[in-house]
Amino acid sequence: MTGSDRGRDFYIATEDEIRTGKTTDVYFLRTLDILKKAGKDRTVVDAEVTTGGLPNGWPWGVLAGVEEAVRLLEGKNVSLWSLPEGTLFEPRTPRGVPLPVMTLEGPYGDWALYETPLLGLVCQTSGIATKAARLRKLANGKQIFSFGVRRMHPGIAPLIERSVYVGGLDAITTPLGSSLLGLPAMGTMPHALVIVMGGSREAFHAVQKYMEKRIPRIALVDTYYDEKTETLLALEEIPDLAGVRLDTPSSRRGNFPQIVREIRWELDVRGHKDVKIYVSGNIDEKTIPALLAAGADGFGIGTSLSNAPTIDFACDIVEIEGRPVAKRGKFGGRKEPLRCPKDGTYEVGVSRCPACGAAMKPVYVQYLDHGEPKEPLPALRDIRSRVIAEVDRIALEV
């Protein structure tokens, strides 16, 4: 079978296929055909992107994917307003009104093909960014590394890595992510190195001898022997050991926090209080607090991060030619979200914060005006800084 017979090697959409609406749900194509024949496809509508709730009872989410949404709609006859990317939001205001995180305006026939990819861009990225932000908050200043790319389709590796960085995590791991995002890729060592080298001591010796000096030496200490045994071997073979990573399998884990305490003791008693302990393998919000209390200095988090629950945003028409409309369960009429600059409370249609009485401020940014860029998109580091600042000022509700 030749490559042309197969069609393509990887089942991922190209940028051109996404931009031309080929990843939309087919019923939008049929809808547009009907509306065009009925002379209704030029009807100007306003649509809002909202969610009825957040996964797992999360009280707040992080909006991500705005940059890609703008790129998707750029050049189309549509205007776009949105909360800035990296903004924390709640599904509803204190009065129970669904909070629109994004609003579109334009002839329905000009943007309907892009509803499916638009939602996909913000739903998945916002879920991962929110999970990352929650983990960062829970880790209380300790390092968190994203190990989740290997659990998902490689075609979305850059999306995952951008989302976790937006959410405030400390490192990405792939060369492609490094190139696209302008960030250094970080990593320790795999079990494969120990196995191929013939043992832990041999692997640690090779790391010390051959790895670039600029790269911190972090030894994986659970391949063949007890974690304490391999930690002591690493100390012998790597004079400038920066840290050890425990990736203890669940079948051998027992009391994982106690293992961390034991390793911390053995390092400290030998004068290596500067050597950090990193843990990985099935780490999530429920396991972090005990490991943190035991002395863990950082966490490698995989599946629970890259496979974070998607935020179920929906895009619903709320006005037609300036007239309020809405399907059942939605609130008709275009709404401008306002936010209190003091406590972050959102509301619509009020001038004063219902919580503290301060004057409310508009929070939307118009990014597109009939398809033309209106406001510049923020830099990635600025988006990340926004998330960190907002997360740091709130309490975490697990």
Image (cartoon, rainbow, N blue to C red):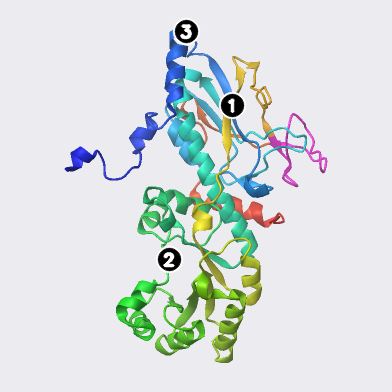
Q: Label 2's element? A: loop
- Seen at 65% across and 18% down, the residue is 325
Asked if the magenta segment contains residue 260, the reply would be no
Q: Nearer the viewer, mark 2 or mark 3?
A: 3
Taking depth in this image into account, of 129 and 353 the one nearest to the observer is 129
Labels 2 and 3: the sequence-earlier one: 3
Q: Label 3's element? A: loop
Q: Which residue is mark 1?
A: 316
Residue 45 visible in the snapshot: yes
Range of the magenta residues? 338-361
Say what amino acid the circle numbered 1 marks.
Answer: Asp
Please say if the residues under marks 2 and 1 sit with CB atoms less than 8 Å apart. no
Q: Is residue 320 above or below residue 342?
A: above
Q: Which mark is residue 180?
A: none
Q: Which residue is mark 3?
A: 38
Q: Residues within 10 Å of mark 1 (few under 14, many from 20)?
A: many
- Seen at 46% across and 23% down, the residue is 28
Taking depth in this image into account, of 61 and 224 the one nearest to the observer is 224
Q: Is residue 307 above or below residue 123?
A: below
